[in-house]
Each structure stands twice: as structure tokens, then as C-alpha cells.
């Protein structure tokens, strides 16, 4: 008889761990006990995360620990996660794309739908021995270069890959279009309410056209531009480095078939201070493009990349508006996140000259031609 699927860390049992790990862990060892500890603050926006330290009947039983990532128990956030298809996206990535992904994501040990409503719990490799940079601190130049090169390697590997057209394996970039519109409508007033004082005066008028055009931009990138596997939340907070300094990427809840330029733009906007971006941004874009070409991407010019980066930057307005649903009515932590990220968003918009197109997006999306 199958054991009960846990809905939270309190429901985990030895029997369940042995059942789930039996098909993915080598050897004949049996788990005899376990201990649970929170990871970070334990609760992310969309998932509740714990480390499970395992005791085996053999001294060298492996793995010694795993990470369990549950759909959050906070109802409003869980509904947002389901609306974003986050739980489906992540398990789809691990089942179909993780094995040969050049960004070396955590090993996948199994996943189950804990409610029968596409709310997936996953068990993955514990990366506790790796180095984890903070999104709220200045990013080291070397880390930025390695992360950008890693994104390019992944994008080149999956560039126009046939699996990207299989909806049972991965969601299209434009699947966010119908999700963003109601999320922006609800989140933008909340964002203004709590954080309008943090928005630069020159940036504020760009929110309205950016919010209005978000859905059309998602559809345009899916229907017109070349696609690859994208992480979807490519910020330094979701990248760690092994002992050799090689980047590894985790938290794949927003994975999609979409434009590689979106990941690169998003990395800039969420990881690099404006002054630093002005210093090293051109180098990072060149590094990214060179990696694409060296790894076999054809028919995609540097001009194509620059145009895609500029257009992708226009999605920052809708994204930050939507985030009002998560961060408004919060405390010091939530305000610190917005106070750190908003200047970076504005710095990215300035770096990619968003002001040139933000008020003419309808024309831009009409005139551009397929690649």
C-alpha cells in the first residue's frame, strides 16, 4: 500500500522517503531516520523549502541530505504559483531538460503531486557546500562573467530545440500573457501604494505603457523571435558556485521556451548595480553573444540581440507591478528588496535605452520581422 504523500515537512515519514528515493538513489541502502531543518527563511514566495538530513542503515549511505520543496501552504501565494504554472514548470524542467542542462542544476530525486491539483513537491540535490552570492550585495565581476557565460551555454544548447514546441514538456513564453494582465491590474496599485517613493521620476511615466504592452510583448517573443530554454528568474540569488567556481542554477519554477535575451536582461536588472552595469554591461553582452556563436547559434546577429534586449527590458514594468501582489503590505524585508531592485531596473532600462521605444511599442511590435 502506498504511503500518504506529505503536504508539508511535518508529514514526511521514513516510509515515504524510502519509497520516493528508491528509484533514483543507487545502491540497496535503507533510510532509517531523518532530521529536518529550514533552508534560509524556509518559506519562499511560492514554495516552502527544507533540508532533510538522512540516516542510512549503511555508514556510507548517499545522499546524506536532500532538499524538499513544497508548494507553499500560504493560500494566496499558492494560488499565484498555480496561476504562474510554477509547480508544473519546475517539475517539467527536471523531468525533461535537467539531465543535460549546461547550467548543471541540482540532481532530481523525484516529485509527486501532493494534492492531485498539480501542486508538485520535488526532492533535489542539496547544494549546501556551494557558495551562494546575495542579491542584496554588490556582485563580483568574475561571478557576473561566469553567470552570463553559463546562461549563454544553456541557451545555445537548447536554441530552437524541437522539445521547446512540446507543450506537455514546457510552457511557452506567451503563456505568461494572460497571467500578467490580471496580476498587473491587481499589483500595480499596491506597488504604487507602498513603493512609489522608490520609483525614479523619469521612470514613473514608463510604467503605464510598459504595463499595457506586457502581454503583447510576451506573445511577440513567442510567435516571432527564436526561442530557447530560459530559466525565467535568472538572478544571482538563483545561482551558486561550486568549489571550482562553476555556476549552477536552481529554482526553475519559471522555466519556459522563450527568448534568451530575457534571461540576460533579467540577470542585469536583478543582480547588478547601475554604476557597475555601465562599467561592465557591454563586456557582459559581448561575452554572452560570443558564447552563443561559438556554440553554434546561427542566423542571430548582434543587432538582433541588442533589439531583443531592449524590448525585453520593457517587461520590467509589468514584472515589478505584478510583484506588488507579493511585497506590498509587508515589512522591512519587503521594502529592502524593492529599494534594492528598483534602481537596478531603472539602470537596466537606461542601459538598453528603453526610452527610445517605450511610447511606441505598438509600432515596434508591428514593424519587426521574424528571424
Image: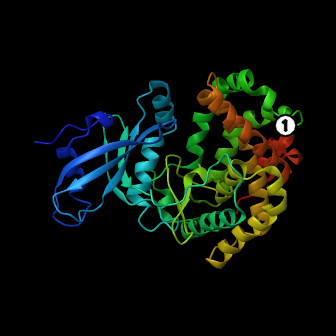
Q: Secondary structure at mark 1?
A: loop
Among all residues in the image, which is located at the extreme left? 1
Is 199 displayed left or right of 293 in the figure? right
Residue 109: x and y in percent read 32, 56
Check the image and report above or below for 17 versus 44.
Answer: below
Check the image and report above or below for 254 versus 320.
Answer: below
The residue sitting at 15% across, 58% down in the picture is: 57
Residue 324: image quadrant is top right
**Quadrant in which the C terminus is drawn:** bottom right
Q: Is residue 324 visible?
A: no
Q: Is residue 276 visible?
A: yes
Q: How is the image coloured?
A: rainbow
Residue 28: x and y in percent read 15, 64
Q: How many marks?
A: 1
Residue 338: image quadrant is top right
Check the image and report above or below for 329 versus 95.
Answer: above
Label 1 Cα crowd, 10 Å radius (few <14 / some 14-19 / many 20+): some
Is 143 displayed left or right of 286 in the figure? left
The residue sitting at 30% across, 58% down in the picture is: 64
Residue 65: image quadrant is bottom left
Is 317 displayed left or right of 90 in the figure? right
**Quadrant in which the N terminus is drawn:** top left
Residue 96: x and y in percent read 40, 59
Among all residues in the image, which is located at the extreme front? 59
Residue 168: x and y in percent read 41, 51
Check the image and report above or below for 235 versus 86.
Answer: below
* 232, 20: nearer the viewer: 20
Instruction: From the image, tell me which residue sits under label 1.
Output: 203
The residue sitting at 72% across, 64% down in the picture is: 141
Amino acid at each position: 500500500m502506498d504511503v500518504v504523500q506529505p503536504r508539508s515537512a511535518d508529514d514526511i515519514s521514513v516510509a515515504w522517503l524510502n519509497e520516493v528515493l528508491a528509484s533514483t538513489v543507487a545502491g540497496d541502502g535503507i533510510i532509517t531516520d531523518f532530521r529536518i531543518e529550514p533552508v534560509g527563511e524556509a518559506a519562499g514566495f511560492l514554495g516552502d523549502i527544507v533540508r532533510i538530513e538522512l540516516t542510512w542503515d549503511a555508514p556510507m549511505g548517499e545522499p546524506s541530505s536532500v532538499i524538499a520543496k513544497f508548494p507553499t501552504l500560504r493560500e494566496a501565494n499558492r494560488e499565484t504559483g498555480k496561476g504562474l504554472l510554477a509547480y508544473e514548470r519546475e517539475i517539467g524542467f527536471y523531468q525533461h531538460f535537467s539531465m543535460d542542462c549546461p547550467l548543471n542544476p541540482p540532481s532530481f530525486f523525484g516529485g509527486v503531486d501532493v494534492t492531485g491539483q498539480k501542486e508538485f513537491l520535488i526532492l533535489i540535490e542539496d547544494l549546501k557546500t556551494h557558495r551562494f552570492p546575495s542579491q542584496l550585495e554588490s556582485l563580483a565581476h568574475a561571478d557576473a562573467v561566469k553567470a552570463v557565460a553559463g546562461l549563454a551555454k544553456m541557451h545555445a544548447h537548447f536554441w530552437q530545440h524541437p522539445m521547446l514546441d512540446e507543450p506537455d514538456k514546457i510552457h511557452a513564453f506567451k503563456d505568461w500573457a494572460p497571467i500578467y494582465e490580471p496580476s498587473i491590474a491587481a499589483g500595480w496599485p499596491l506597488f504604487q501604494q507602498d513603493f512609489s517613493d522608490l520609483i525614479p521620476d523619469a521612470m514613473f511615466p514608463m510604467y503605464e505603457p510598459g504595463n499595457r504592452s506586457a502581454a503583447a510583448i510576451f506573445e511577440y517573443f513567442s510567435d516571432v523571435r527564436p526561442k530557447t530554454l530560459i530559466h525565467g528568474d535568472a538572478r544571482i540569488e538563483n545561482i551558486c558556485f561550486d568549489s571550482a567556481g562553476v555556476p549552477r542554477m536552481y529554482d526553475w519554477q519559471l522555466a519556459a521556451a522563450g527568448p534568451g535575451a530575457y534571461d540576460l536582461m533579467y540577470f542585469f536588472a536583478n543582480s547588478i548595480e547601475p554604476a557597475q552595469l555601465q562599467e561592465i554591461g557591454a563586456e557582459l553582452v559581448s561575452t554572452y553573444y560570443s558564447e552563443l556563436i561559438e556554440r553554434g547559434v546561427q542566423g542571430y546577429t548582434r543587432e538582433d540581440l541588442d533589439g531583443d534586449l531592449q524590448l525585453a527590458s520593457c517587461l520590467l514594468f509589468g514584472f515589478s507591478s505584478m510583484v506588488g501582489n507579493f511585497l506590498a503590505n509587508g515589512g522591512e524585508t519587503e521594502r529592502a528588496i524593492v529599494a534594492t531592485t528598483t534602481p537596478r531596473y531603472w539602470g537596466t532600462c537606461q542601459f538598453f535605452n528603453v526610452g527610445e521605444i517605450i511610447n511606441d511599442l505598438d509600432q515596434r511590435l508591428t514593424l519587426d520581422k521574424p528571424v
